[in-house]
Image: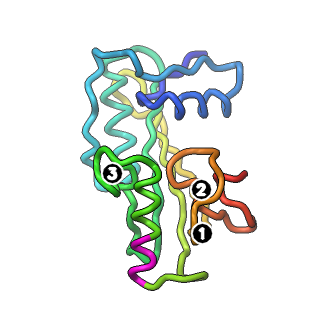
């Protein structure tokens, strides 16, 4: 079965392929210049995922999955939230975003248990412009004092999931 992921991020496409296994043929949008970049104008992860899934499913046949995900830090009022990818600027790298996050936590004096956070991911599945399903996953945890590990994406090197002594970047 083929699944098209509404992303040009090859790392994200590979991660979804790894999770789904060989029964699925997963492909992203890299190299597909006809598909215009979709502006994430929603006010929530769910709205953004649905916007992307519907827009791409109107242009390509088959099943389309789109996601929007990010980090919500309680001490920062839920930031970076839906702005996780652009938290340190549009062209910032993961290291820049992590640096800004750690700096903001120091500014507000958040230590130890005051660093509670969660990763939230919403997936939207669509075909022919119609949403078929919406799925949400949340992992609770806290933000480490410094980046540790090199695996994963984005904020993984500073996110300690509850019940673990290692960051997502170390697991």
The residue that label 3 is drawn on is: 86
**Which percent across, then down, holds residue 19?**
67, 34
As drawn, 17 above or below 136:
above
Nearer the N terminus, badge 2 or badge 3? 3
Which residue is drawn at the image coordinates 39% and 42% (left, top)? 49
Which residue is drawn at the image coordinates 42% and 71% (left, top)? 103
- Secondary structure under the numbered disc 3 in the rendered image: helix
Q: Which colour scheme is used?
A: rainbow
Which residue is drawn at the image coordinates 58% and 53% (left, top)? 156
The residue that label 2 is drawn on is: 157
Label 2 vs label 1: CA separation? 8 Å
Foreground mark, 2 or 3? 2
For residue 97, the mark is none
Q: Do the residues labelled 2 and 3 touch (CB within 8 Å)?
A: no
Q: Are marks 2 and 1 in contact (CB under 8 Å)?
A: yes
Label 2 vs label 3: CA separation? 17 Å
**Which percent across, then down, holds residue 25?**
60, 17
The chief SS type of the magenta part is helix
As drawn, 49 above or below 145:
above
Which residue is drawn at the image coordinates 71% and 19% (left, top)? 22
Q: What stretch is highlighted in magenta?
A: 103-108
**Which percent across, then down, holds residue 17?**
62, 27
41 drawn magenta: no
Nearer the N terminus, badge 2 or badge 1? 1
Q: Dot 2, crowdedness within 10 Å: few (<14), some or many (≥20)?
A: many
Label 1 vs label 3: CA separation? 21 Å
**Which percent across, then down, holds residue 27?**
51, 20
The residue that label 1 is drawn on is: 144
């Amino acid at each position: 079965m083929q699944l098209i992921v509404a992303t040009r991020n090859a790392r994200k496409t590979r991660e979804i392929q790894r999770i789904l296994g060989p029964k699925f043929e997963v492909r992203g949008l890299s190299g597909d210049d006809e598909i215009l970049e979709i502006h994430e104008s929603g006010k929530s992860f769910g709205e953004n995922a649905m916007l992307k899934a519907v827009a791409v499913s109107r242009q390509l046949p088959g099943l389309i999955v789109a996601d929007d995900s990010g980090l919500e830090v309680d001490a920062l009022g839920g930031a970076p939230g839906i702005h996780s990818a652009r938290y340190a600027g549009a062209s910032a790298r993961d290291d820049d975003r992590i640096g800004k996050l750690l700096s903001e936590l120091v500014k507000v004096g958040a230590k130890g248990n005051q660093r509670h956070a969660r990763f939230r991911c919403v997936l939207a599945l669509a075909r022919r412009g119609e949403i078929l399903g919406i799925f949400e996953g949340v992992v609770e945890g806290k933000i480490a004092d410094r980046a540790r590990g090199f695996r994963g994406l984005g904020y993984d090197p500073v996110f300690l999931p509850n019940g673990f002594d290692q960051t997502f970047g170390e697991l």
